[in-house]
Image: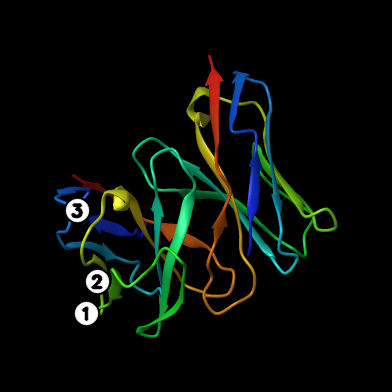
Amino acid sequence: GENVEQHPSTLSVQEGDSAVIKCTYSDSASNYFPWYKQELGKGPQLIIDIRSNVGEKKDQRIAVTLNKTAKHFSLHITETQPEDSAVYFCAASKPSNTGKLIFGQGTTLQVKP
Amino acid sequence: EPEVTQTPSHQVTQMGQEVILRCVPISNHLYFYWYRQILGQKVEFLVSFYNNEISEKSEIFDDQFSVERPDGSNFTLKIRSTKLEDSAMYFCASGGQGTTGELFFGEGSRLTVL
């Protein structure tokens, strides 16, 4: 079945540095790739997404890149701040009438002041 | 900003008891979901619901689970006879478009089965 692998599981960076989280997906029919941020005790919140007709998307300090050939997509956070500390999940979805998301395992990002 | 709301935030129950988790999706959304997250693990899909019926369910969603949209606003997940392994955070989500559209998640209901 569909699978999404996410690496690394934990990432620690100094404030101001960049952070990169990578995901691979197994189903080549997947065409929607959101990234969610989950703070302690809260539900996942969408921070950025990309569709398969686009190779890169940027929103201020956050960017996502997609390589459809390799079935990879990555989240890039520049100029990290302590409030970026959270668990980040990638996900993938394919065209269907259900909109189901398959999530990666999550990356715990710690930004040290 | 519209949001998905869930109740209760935390429920403790004895093994074998029935539990109902409630969700109020965003009002103009048509697609509804339940996901669960066992502590420290990934978020897992349980079930999707559209047009008053289940559109897809995972292997986890066995006969002990059921969903219902009893009125125009609530979306519920019922676990008929809880097991220890049902202890998890359960997230409700809703979306305006079923085909690869953005999903909005609630804050979750933590279920502890003793």
Q: Residue furthest top?
A: A113
Q: Are marks 3 and 2 on the same chain?
A: yes
- Name the spot of residue A1 as percent of width and height, x first: 63, 64
Return the chain for callout 2.
B
Of labels 3 and 2, earlier in sequence is: 3
Q: Residues within 10 Å of mark 1 (few under 14, many from 20)?
A: few
Q: Residues within 10 Å of mark 2 (few under 14, many from 20)?
A: some
The residue labelled by disc 3 is B8
Quadrant location of the N terminus of chain B in the rendered image? bottom left
Name the colouring of the figure. Answer: rainbow
- Tag 1 secondary structure: loop
Examine the rendered structure and indicate whether residue B65 appears above or below residue B111: below
Residue B31 visible in this rendered orientation of the protein? no
- Tag 2 secondary structure: loop
- Tag 3 secondary structure: loop
Q: Are marks 1 and 2 in contact (CB under 8 Å)?
A: yes
Left or right: where B57 falls relative to A60: left
Q: Are marks 1 and 3 on the same chain?
A: yes
Q: Disc 3 marks which amino acid?
A: Pro
- Name the spot of residue B8 as percent of width and height, x first: 19, 53
